[in-house]
Amino acid sequence: MNRKSIPALLTLASLAAAPSFASDRSLESAWKRVDYTGAASGKLSLPLLPGTSGFTFTMYGAPGSAAAIQELAEVMKANDLGNGFDPAGSSEAELADACRYLSQIGWPSIFYSGAEMQIKGGRAVFGEKTRAALDIMRSRPLYAAYQLGEWGYYLHNLSNNEGWLKDVYGPDFEKYRFVVKPAGLAGYEHMPASKQECYDYVKDYYTSRQNDLCGSVISVTGHSQYEAYAAEWGASCVGLELGENIGFTQCKLAFARGAARQWNKPWSVQVSPWFGPSCTSSGPLRTESGIVRGLDAGHSLSFYRRLWTHAWFAGAAMVTPENSIATAFDTPARPWNLTTYGKQMQLFFRFTRSHDRGVPYTPVAVVLDHLAGYNAYMDKPWGTLKPTAGDRQVRDLFDSQLFPGADHVHVRTEELKANPEAGYLRATPVGEIFDVLLSSATADTLSAYPVIMLAGDMEFAPGFVSALTAAAKHGSQIWLSRAHKAALGTAYPELAHSGRVVVLEEGTVGNAGRSSAISDARLLSLKALLPFEVSGDAVEYQVNRTKSGWAIELINNQGVIKKGDTPAIVDNSAMAKITLRPKFKAAHVDAWTPETKISPARNALQVRIGPGESAILEFRLR
């Protein structure tokens, strides 16, 4: 297996040869100005769930009664399996009793209203009784919310699917036939003519659903990237569903974390066990009603552990292993014997409680227009509009430059045919140093980023221009294209007067011949922002600022071959060999992952990471 290659425009080998730009010299010390809150200005800390003092790891699918929830919670506490529920699963009749118990033990919980949660005008409309039950927890305050899950996918794909809606409504379908949207309109009543019209329609849909679910909603998006809009429109937590058959994993993390920072909301990750027509569960590998199930079905245990750990390190307030009630135990009842999956949950939760992850260091804000409606799954803005050249540049930026090779939904390479799981987590050329924001971000938020990169079509409203100017005066570099310069018009000279504006050189995208938003060479120059030089085999990596120094996560995504209906195959020869060169003097280095093999080299560390394993090293400053 060739460990040196990344199937994309950029490679780690070419990173070393990246040219030095005169305008980037001021970025070389940006990491020195980062405090423990994660940004030079100290304004990029990430909120936890209300009522909590640390990370939340939840059990998915608690039983219906309050007494049964209490029994499961005691099992979880005794075995270090988590400290919350998502969903809590209590029936409406017993919701108040469940909330009273959960409030006593201080566990945040998500509640679930079934498939109808997504349907505007349907039967999932809650009243004062439900609101009063949730208020038992929220008045503490302790986090309690209803899930509004996969609403972007529903809006654009299921809202016109009569067969699915018949399954949801059963004998009541004819009474609710009015909820079926016209075919071919991606969920809209009429074909929208502009991004503004799409924005208004989707906002009305989302806020209507949020109001019907008692106003406290955790938005969970999967096949769409509307995280920033959910935060803007009032979501109490910005959630992602990952795993499953969902693409663009690392890009979606950047969207969710950016939305959380822009709107000061916690964000979360739910990891789905579905993988093609298969689903991880307890028991032997078997087929039931056309679905492959068992501990060896679905994704690999290695993948689950890597994604849980990465989501935690990336700043998520909560991680949920979906279907864990049916996966963690041989049988979800006494004697509650743990499966190998359950033991991995136990190890992971203990790990998170043993280490202060710090705050993700993401020095680059990629800013999209407020009305961009980016939707990679549909490959159209807002799921329906024809992409412009600017829209296409944004898509190429994410898929081919920042997070290469992660679109396993539309692109089926030979690598993915042999190992379908290989498309979910990928090595990246300059690490995961990006948050995605919208142009509605305030000057306070923007000024926390050393580099602000504008991408795609942009409307330069006066408020946005003022925010950019303030950020530039504060010390942020503004990276924009020649098209952005032209669109700024008479506002450009004042912005440029700060001396912090960089007009980017365009490149080309692979063999497509399209112009890119940024040249490969300029993109690779962002390595100057990092406190480490990372070289060697292709790995995924992220850097966090800790109270005592810096921590770096290195992920070897190679060496585990997994298809949904067969057990994982591990290639033990796929060992990643990395050289880490800190740009600072470290008094001590701690390997949080004891299986990680490290050895000193001249002004560097050699790190060896096994196939499908993660390594986290903390460097304490003098």
Image (cartoon, rainbow, N blue to C red):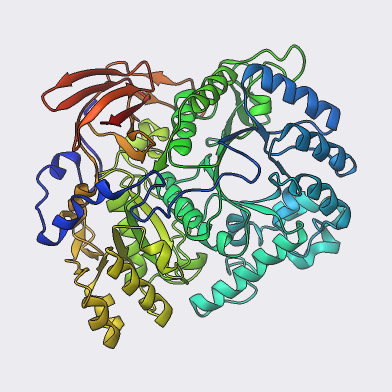
Task: Classify the position of the N terminus by image quarter.
Answer: top left
Q: Quadrant of residue 182?
A: bottom right
| Residue 81, image x, y percentages | 62, 23
Numbered circles on residues, count: 0
Q: Quadrant of residue 3?
A: top left
- Asked if one can make out residue 78 in the rendered structure from this viewpoint, the answer is yes
22 sits to left or right of 573: left
What residue is at 16 percent from the left and 66 percent from the top?
A: 505
- Asked if one can make out residue 409 in the rendered structure from this viewpoint, the answer is no
Above/below status of 371 relative to 450: below
| Residue 386, image x, y percentages | 43, 71
What residue is at 47 percent from the left and 38 percent from the top?
A: 311
Above/below status of 328 relative to 365: above
What residue is at 28 percent from the left and 34 percent from the top?
A: 539
| Residue 497, image x, y percentages | 21, 78
| Residue 361, image x, y percentages | 35, 45
Q: Residue furthest bottom?
A: 490
Above/below status of 441 relative to 278: below
408 sits to left or right of 206: left
Front residue of 260/285: it is 260
Task: Classify the position of the C terminus by image quarter.
Answer: top left
Q: Quadrant of residue 340?
A: top right
Q: Residue furthest front?
A: 622
